[in-house]
Image (spheres, helix red, strand yellow):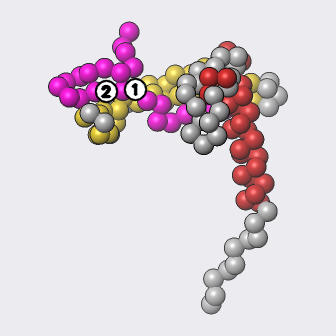
Amino acid sequence: MKPRIEDIASGITCEVIALHTTMLYDPKAGDARIVFAGTPCLYSGDEYLGPGGDAYPLSVTLSGIASQCFGEGTDPVTGADLSTISCAGAVAIIKAAFAKLYDAEQSLPPPMPPEA
């Protein structure tokens, strides 16, 4: 088992971070597949040096983790306790964000054509 964070050389740390996450929502089933692309990232102290290897996919279903609360600390904007937000709640927030952002974008007037 490889640790998520490890010292790999003097002063160099490798931390596997999901730099890219994809959620494939199935409205008919009311479930989603969530794929985390865990990528080894290199650090020298607190300085990010960049990716240090290929992404490792970690795939789960929302139904499999819906009731779990993985959050730690507080929301940096609202101060809400993140340990009380379930995975199902996080997906509901993402779905609501898309709906509101989409509606706002669609309510904008179309761009003006360039002047000839």
Query: Which residue is located at x 62 percent, y 90 percent?
Result: 116
| Pointer 1 with pointer 2, Cβ within 8 A | yes
Quarter holding the N terminus is top left
Residue 104 inside the magenta-drawn segment: no
Which kind of residue does numbered mark 1 sit on?
A: Val
Task: Write down the region rendered in magenta.
Answer: 1-25
Query: In this view of the protein, can residue 100 be seen by the observer?
Result: yes
Mark 1 secondary-structure assignment? strand
Mark 2 secondary-structure assignment? strand
Image location (x, y in percent) of residue 88? 72, 25
Q: What secondary structure is the magenta-colored segment mainly? A: strand
Q: Residue furthest top?
A: 1
Q: How far apart are marks 1 and 2 (CA)?
A: 7 Å
Query: Which residue is located at x 75 percent, y 30 percent?
Result: 26
The one nearer the camera, 60 or 65, is: 65
Residue 14 inside the magenta-drawn segment: yes
Query: Which residue is located at x 40 percent, y 26 percent?
Result: 16
State whether residue 87 is above or below residue 47: above
Residue 14's disc number = 2
Residue 16's disc number = 1
State whether residue 3 is above or below residue 110: above
